[in-house]
Amino acid sequence: MTSDRRDGSGFRVSRRRALTVGGAAALSVLSARGLSVATSSANRSDDRPERGAPGDDADPIRRVHDAGVTGSGVRVAVLDPTGFDPTHAALAGAVADIRQFSAERAVVDRTTHGTAAAASVARLAPDARVLLASFRTPEEFVAAIDWCRTGDVDVVLAPVAAHGTAATPQSDVYRATRRAIDSGTVVVAPTGNAALGHWRGPYAALAGDGPDSRRRLRITALSAADSLSGRFLAWLVTDPSLGVDLTLALLRAVDGGERWNLVAVSQPVASRAGQRLVADLSDAEYALVVRPAGRVSSFSPSAAGDSAAGTGRVEVTTPTHALSRARPLGSIAAPASVPGVVGVGVTETDRDAAPPGHATATASDAALPDPVSPYSGRGPTPQGGVGVDVVAPPRPWVADGRPGTSAAAARAAGVAALLRGIDPALSPRDVTEVLRRSAGDLGRSGRDLSSGWGRLDVVAAVQRVRAR
């Protein structure tokens, strides 16, 4: 049994504590620390879902597992801010270690987003060892990914989209991710679910809240929501060439839109390039505008006193709502936007569930309408790359709520583990190229900014590596 301690690799807890998680006793012994669990695949629980469980592309996955491709010898780390339940049936016997890099508990007794992501990896690569790490801030993400880099981790899954973080070579997130890739670790991340809540354009187009309604960016509900009510989160990133500090202002319509009252203003967040705005919305009409910091009245772009004010660009992103004039291109989020990361989007349709009037999709996937989900993050990246390598269906996924690009990325990470299990010498570039070249083309012929190189094909990817 390991002892509870903290070093430069986050918090660790004993195996005994890990075994009590999920029960009443866990409530009295859990502390803000991680845990270490070491078990062999031979001791896994009998109630763990069988390989190729129904609803998880059973036949092709079973074919891969039956061929002896199970991710044996591979270490996969999952980095997630929501914590993990290591007692979940899909993770029984698979967890090798848990670390905590934030003040909140890494071990929880519910099926969180992190639990679902780790479970997806374990179901696709049942003999891989899974390492779990929780974090909250960009600094904690850097610490977690550096821990993975120095711990012989083969694949890192970061099922997060850090909106408001600039993925530039000067970014700590960028540099830490690149260190991991350069050391031989495959890093997989979702493109994010904010394509319908993304806008990028000239600062002047959103400057001010006077009578010109065209300068207001209206907030709308996502297709799955009945109203705007609920928590609203948005990020503002500005072009450094503007030379002026800007804020994002949330306005609420009054008197049928004759007037607009100020509801909230964004605030700068440490270690990020932009600003963050959080507010609780009621079922009303809301809009966003951009203002120079400290100003609360209407103004024109020239009021900023900078010649770049009319031409510099700003970027607004909300993952919780949609925007009336959304511009999906460029909505890919960090860390997926970091060069070398396997960026994964999500498909709107599955092979087994083609829409009415279309044959069950195989090679005909390209003929399906809108094969990529409208909310799936699109390229290009800030560096001009495609950003999306492959897209995948959002399954398996065991958590509540509608799965998105995180579920698709978890699937891709599981496949990357299978490939590394076949050939441990595969470099991150090799794994990326295999996933790309084995993918089934979608939409327009060839790669594109929404689907990348196409739909992830588990069997084709495995066959490609076995034939090397």
Image (tube, rainbow, N blue to C red):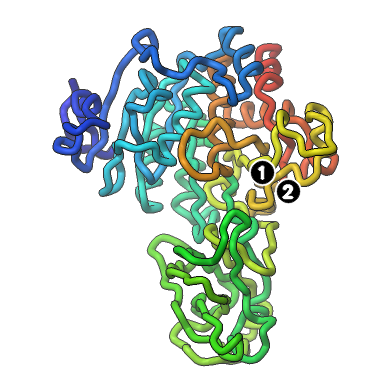
Horizontally, residue 402 falls left or right of residue 118, namely right
Few, some or many residues within 10 Å of mark 1 (<14, 14–19, 20+)? many
Numbered label tally:
2
Q: Return the mark for residue 388.
A: 1
Q: Return the mark for residue 27.
A: none
Say if 261 sits above or below 13 in the image.
below
Residue at image point 54% right, 22% down: 124
Say if 360 sits above or below 324 in the image.
above
Residue tagged by mark 2? 449
Q: Is residue 125 visible?
A: yes
* Viewer-closest of 354 and 391: 354
Residue at image point 19% right, 38% down: 27
Few, some or many residues within 10 Å of mark 2 (<14, 14–19, 20+)? many
Q: Is residue 246 visible?
A: no
> Residue 245 appears at what percent x and percent y?
49, 78
Amino acid residing under circle 1: Val
Q: Quadrant of residue 106?
A: top left
Secondary structure beneath dot 1 equals loop
Circles 2 and 1: CB distance less than 8 Å? Answer: yes
Residue at image point 42% right, 38% down: 114
